């Protein structure tokens, strides 16, 4: 019965959801190995949430900007898949057949969104200071930071942790501003400019001010 549930054509959207969860985990893990963060890259592509429009209110309701976007996507996919499989199992037990795939697929969207809303709030509460704030990218120039993952060298960015003027933590991909410099994990740096998707940094001349 369980095997039939997972292989039935009426449950394929939920199988795809679980496959995406595994794929996201693999991509994020690979990104950590090569000092790139797909989650941070995706967050940079998404619009800032200011709360002054209908779209902003919807995105804020889903905690976008407070929780990494890939985490929110995984929460949605998890809620969507778990509810979808459960719905089809109950339907088969009561009716003797699975619901049409489009009915089950649409019915699982709302529980997926509810999962994002409820668990996203919990995650946002647990990591309140590691959120992406709606500040200008240029405002991070001149801020000190610490290389938090990988080794930063020209052509190979590493992840750095930088606090903005509000004390909120941002995770940036940084490269040395000087060609032959290398900043290993734990190195204290100073953000000096932004080139493309990456920030350029130098050794922090005043580490005591961190």
Image (spheres, helix red, strand yellow):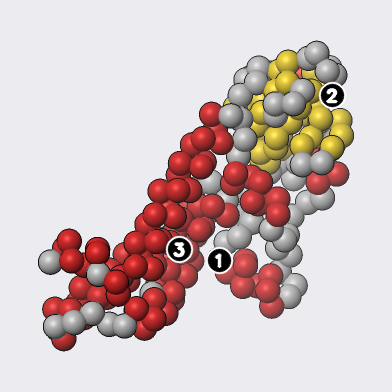
Q: CA distance from mark 1 to mark 2?
A: 37 Å
Residue under the point 44% across and 74% down: 109
| Residue 195 falls in image quadrant | top right
- Residue at numbered disc 1: 62
Between marks 1 and 3 in the image, the one whose residue lies nearer the viewer: 3
Residue lying furthest bottom: 95
* Quadrant (top left, top right, bottom left, bottom right) of the N terminus: bottom left
197, above or below 115, in the image = above
Q: Nearer the viewer, residue 126 or 11?
A: 11
- Give coordinates of residue 100: x percent, y percent: 31, 83
Q: Nearer the viewer, residue 202 or 41?
A: 41
Q: Secondary structure at mark 3?
A: helix
Residue under the point 74% across and 65% down: 50
- Residue at numbered disc 3: 76
Q: Secondary structure at mark 1?
A: loop
Q: Are marks 3 and 2 in contact (CB under 8 Å)?
A: no
Q: Nearer the viewer, residue 54 or 84?
A: 84
- Give coordinates of residue 170: x percent, y percent: 68, 41
Q: CA distance from mark 1 to mark 3?
A: 10 Å
- Residue at numbered disc 2: 177
Left or right, 208 with reference to 26:
right
Q: Earlier in the sequence, mark 1 or mark 2?
A: 1
120, above or below 172, in the image = below
Left or right, 79 with reference to 9:
right
Q: Earlier in the sequence, mark 1 or mark 3?
A: 1
Q: Earlier in the sequence, mark 3 or mark 2?
A: 3
Residue under the point 39% across and 54% down: 19
Q: CA distance from mark 3 to mark 2?
A: 39 Å
Label number found at residue 17: none
| Residue 65 falls in image quadrant | bottom right
| Residue 47 falls in image quadrant | bottom right
Q: Nearer the viewer, residue 8 or 194?
A: 8
């Amino acid at each position: 019965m369980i095997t039939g549930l997972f292989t039935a054509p009426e449950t394929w959207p939920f199988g795809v959801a679980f496959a995406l969860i595994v794929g996201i985990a693999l991509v994020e893990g690979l990104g950590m190995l090569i000092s790139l963060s797909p989650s941070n890259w995706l967050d940079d592509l998404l619009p800032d949430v200011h709360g002054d429009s209908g779209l902003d209110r919807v995105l804020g309701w889903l905690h976008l900007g407070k929780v990494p976007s890939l985490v929110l996507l995984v929460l949605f996919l998890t809620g969507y898949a778990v509810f979808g499989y459960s719905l089809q199992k109950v339907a088969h037990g009561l009716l003797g057949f699975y619901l049409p795939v489009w009915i089950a697929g649409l019915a699982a969207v709302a529980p997926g969104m509810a999962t994002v809303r409820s668990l996203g709030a919990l995650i946002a509460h647990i990591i309140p200071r590691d959120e992406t704030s709606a500040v200008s990218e240029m405002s991070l120039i001149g801020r000190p930071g610490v290389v938090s993952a990988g080794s930063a060298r020209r052509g190979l960015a590493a992840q750095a942790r930088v606090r903005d003027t509000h004390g909120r933590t941002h995770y940036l991909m940084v490269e040395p501003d000087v060609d032959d410099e290398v900043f290993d994990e734990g190195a204290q740096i100073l953000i000096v400019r932004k080139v493309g998707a990456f920030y350029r940094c130098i050794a922090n001349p005043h580490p005591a001010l961190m």
